[in-house]
Amino acid sequence: MKMSKVLSVAIVVCLIIGFSSCKKKGCMDPYAINYNEKAKKDDPDSPCLYASEDPENKNVVLQEFTAINCGACPGGHKVGDEIQAANPNDVVIMAIHGGTGLATPNGPDEVDLRTEWRNDLLSGWGTGGSFGYPMAFVNRRDFSSSGLSAWGGYGMYKSNWSAATDIVLAEPSYVNVAASSTINTETRELTVHAEAFFTADGALMNKLHIALLQNNILSAQSGSSSYSDLIDPATGLYKQQHILRHMITGSDGESLIETSSGTRFVKDFTYVIPADIDYDPNDNYPGAAYDLNNLEVVVYISDAGTTEIISGAYSSWRD
């Protein structure tokens, strides 16, 4: 009888081990380059990878400087959206509100969309502090030799954004960048798993930048009446898109020292998302509340010496 019990226990243990071994391990994220559709469990010894090892052309990062009291700015938003639609998965847009004057709310239904990062993004990058809205950098490159820079240096009016985009997209990139993000809705902690893979030798030092954006913020907007497709029908307010909320890696970015061909950089970054951002608590205009269901995460790589952006991408999301 005792022998029978021992055998029974042994059989049960073997069955448990057998069933466990049937749960095939591998990357279960379909956005990963090593996704395994047969996997039933993530494999910690072979984690998901996101940055491709195949040589690719550059992506565009369009940093658009805009303002809620700028009547010409919805036209700039429209141009950016059209460029992005014409080049799916290859164009990233960051809408940057800030400074005084046109970006300062002063009327009913206006939400304060200004960001503390605006001046850092402008500093030393070619406009000399004087420009007209809407203005954008395309990969923070000086296109004046191509006749595309309206204010000198990197600043371009909307009529030149498409031509600059075409130039960048036709060039090979020495680095691919990608990310996967998750949000704990209870703690509001955002985790960004960022990767870069160098398909050729990079700069002496590169920088990784991570930006948190938000879509569909409702606010009054000068000049919006001509763009009915950008108006929220329920409220009549303008749907602000790609709004820069926070630079997770700060204004300087994360330094990448190892930039030789074949190098893969992998790092997780975390940020606890506040309820809102109020740029000026002393005025009467509210800051925009964070909507966890309308966020975008952008990752991009720059040359630390020139600050030119090499390539960028939107992060995928994972539950």
Image: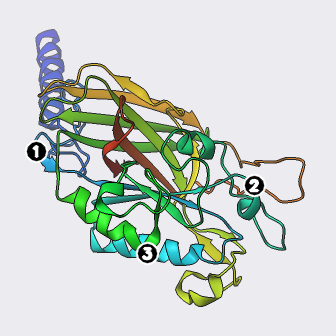
Along the polypeptide, which appears first: circle 1 or circle 2?
1
| Residue visible at 71% across and 57% down in the picture | 288
302 with respect to 253 (left or right): left
Q: Which residue is mark 3?
A: 79
Q: Quadrant of the N terminus?
A: top left
Nearer-N-terminus badge (1/3): 1
Q: Of the numbered discs in the image, which one, if any, rests on residue 286?
A: none
According to the picture, the residue beneath numbered tag 2 turns out to be: 100
What is the spatial separation of the Cα atoms under label 1 and label 3, in whole angstroms? Answer: 29 Å
- Which amino acid lies under the numbered mark 2 shown in the image of this protein? Thr
Q: Which is in the foreground here, disc 1 or disc 3?
A: 3
Q: Give percent across and percent down for residue 162.
A: 33, 70
Q: Position of residue 113 (x, y in %)?
A: 68, 57
Residue 260, placed above or below residue 51? above
Observer-nearest residue: 33 or 174?
174
At 13% from the left edge and 18% from the top edge, which residue is drawn?
Answer: 10
Spot occupied by residue 160 in the image (x, y as percentages of width and height):
38, 69
Q: Secondary structure at mark 1?
A: loop
Res 67 quadrant in image:
bottom right
**What is the number of the mark on residue 55?**
1
For the residues bearing labels 1 and 2, Cβ distance under 8 angstroms: no
Q: Residue at x 57, y 76 (%)?
A: 74
Quadrant in which residue 8 is drawn: top left
Task: Measuring from the top left, give residue 262's x and y in whole percent.
Answer: 12, 28
Amino acid at the residue labelled 1: Pro
Q: Are marks 1 and 3 in contact (CB under 8 Å)?
A: no
